[in-house]
Amino acid sequence: MGNDICDIAIVGCGPAGLSAAVNASIRRKSVNLFGGELCAPKLQKSAVVNNYLGSPEVSGEILREKFLEHARSMNIPVTRLIINSVTQNSKGGFTLQAADASYDARAVIIATGVTVDKLIEGERDFIGKGVGYCATCDGPLFEGKDVAVVAYTAEGVEDANFLKDICRKVYFVSSDNKLFSGLKSGIEAIEAKSVQAVTGGGSVDGLRIDGRDLAVQGVFIYRETYLPDTLLPGLAVRENHVQVDRELKTNIEGVFAAGDCTGKPYQLAKAVGEGQVAALNAVNYLDSIPG
Ligand SMILES: Cc1cc2nc3c(=O)[nH]c(=O)nc-3n(C[C@H](O)[C@H](O)[C@H](O)COP(=O)(O)OP(=O)(O)OC[C@H]3O[C@@H](n4cnc5c(N)ncnc54)[C@H](O)[C@@H]3O)c2cc1C
């Protein structure tokens, strides 16, 4: 199990999440900020940022370090864990599930960014019917069955190894063959140029890659971020973005969203600004409900 209940859990430690954490902390709310191995990976990839007010021609990496240093200077820790699911709990708050731990919070800000990888044809149709994003959560449903792991990030390696102990056959499909060295023996690694479709009738029966069909009952997909409504079932989305109002409230009371995950423009200043607005409105929400 994880920590004691915090006021606001922030999922994603990019510019939006960091801005939300700083602003919520200034308003004296306890914050749990979650992120993967690297915070703000997009900023790191950005050679020069020239549209962030006050910092002309700055490298993305320098801005990233400044943002992290700001959070560190306020004693805001980053919990380096990917959150697999967020659910409403019986205490009127939310439970966030990571691989081996869960965390409770009174309010949540989703700041997970957007994935640059396109959805696979059929992926959305088979969510919960064979398509999954978390082997720890759904792997046991595939005991003795054949599954494929489609990995756009290194996180797929760990889950493929976990699935190897449960499933009859595990295929590991990625365009990045550097990931293959971390796989347990017995996993079939396939370097694929194109992951074309998840196929099936009522449930998954195959994965089409480079014109070849793998017969599998499960497909686990690992990208930089989850589709928001697979992270939090029932969350309203439009074209894979979280639907929010001007206060950055979602359709679920106590859940806010900020940054690229709410839609275009995918820009730093928007992410930082939305992080602040979401944090202040999450604070207002908490102040309006019984403690
Ligand atoms: C190459 C490049 C250059 C760019 N140049 C510019 C520029 O010059 N000017 C500009 O304004 N914008 C630029 N951008 C866009 C800018 O980087 C983004 O708009 C900004 O980073 C969005 O911030 P965000 O916090 O919403 O999302 P992100 O920066 O994507 O951060 C999301 C964070 O959430 C984490 N995360 C995701 N899912 C989970 C989960 N389930 N659990 C825990 N953590 C999770 C991720 O690991 C990541 O750290 C550029 C982007 C790229 C890729």
Image (tube, rainbow, N blue to C red):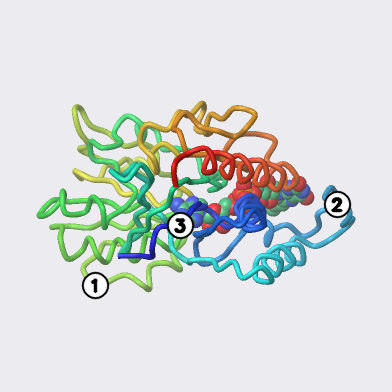
Evaluate if marks 1 and 2 touch, with contact meaning CB atoms under 8 Å apart.
Answer: no
Residue placed furthest toward the front: 290
Q: Is mark 2 within 8 Å of ligand 1?
A: yes
Which amino acid, mark 2?
A: Asn
Which amino acid, mark 1?
A: Ser
Q: Is residue 269 left or right of residue 90?
A: right
Check disc 3 and report the residue beneath it: 6
Q: Is residue 106 left or right of residue 246?
A: left
Q: What is the CA distance from the residue labelled 2 to the residue labelled 3?
A: 36 Å
**Vertical placement of residue 127 versus 66, above or below:** above
Which of pointers 2 and 3 indicates the residue nearer the eye? 3
Residue 209 x %, y %: 36, 44
Closer-to-camera residue (258/178): 258
Please give the name of the residue rendered at 34% of the width and 48% of the height, measured from the top-left corner: 133
Residue 217 x %, y %: 19, 43
Q: Secondary structure at mark 1?
A: loop
Which amino acid, mark 3?
A: Cys
Check disc 1 and report the residue beneath it: 185
Is residue 11 visible in the rendered image? The answer is no
Closer-to-camera residue (30/98): 30
Give the mark nearest the N terminus, 1 or 2: 2
Q: What is the CA distance from the residue labelled 1 to the residue labelled 2?
A: 47 Å
Instruction: Give the number of the disc on residue 50.
Output: 2
Q: Is residue 169 left or right of residue 181?
A: left
Please give the name of the residue rendered at 17% of the width and 57% of the height, measured from the top-left corner: 169
